[in-house]
Amino acid sequence: MKSSATRRTFFGAMGAAASLAAIAIAKKPIAAPVALPTALTETSKKGYQLSEHVKRYYRSTVA
């Protein structure tokens, strides 16, 4: 019955490793919000303009 004890040990170790990985991921610090580049914040009459809905989109992607 040595093989079943080895199998139990293996699966027990895998379960413990998965639990530790989940705890490590849960404790990972949340990234700070990223400031938009200054080129994107300047508006002009031509080309790209940083509007409120674009700012909202950028804030939603930094989660």
Image (tube, grey):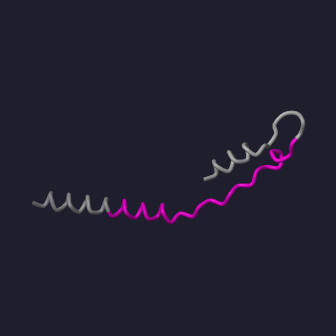
- Would residue 11 be found to the left or right of residue 49 on screen? left
Q: Nearer the viewer, residue 9 or 29?
A: 29
Q: Quadrant of residue 15?
A: bottom left
Picture mark count: 0
Q: Is residue 52 above or below residue 3?
A: above
Q: Is residue 38 toward the left or the right of residue 10 in the image? A: right
Tell me if 27 is positioned left or right of 44 in this view. Answer: left
**Which portion, as a residue range, is magenta?**
16-43
Outermost residue on the top side: it is 46
Q: Residue furthest left?
A: 1
- The x, y position of residue 22, in whole percent, is 42, 61
The quarter in which the N terminus is drawn is bottom left
Residue at the spot 80% in from the left edge and 45% down from the top edge: 40
- Residue drawn where x is 59% and y is 61% of the image: 30
Viewed as shown, does residue 4 lie left or right of 58? left
Identify which residue, 19 or 48, lies in the foreground: 48
Q: Position of residue 6 (x, y in %)?
A: 19, 60
Question: At which x and y percent is residue 58?
Answer: 69, 47
In front: 6, or 56?
56
Picture residue at 82% right of the left edge, 47% below the top: 41
Q: Which residue ends up furthest to the right in the rendered image? A: 45
State the residue at coordinates (13%, 61%).
Answer: 2
Residue 25 lies within the magenta run = yes
Instruction: From the viewer's side, name the closer residue of 57 and 26.
Output: 57
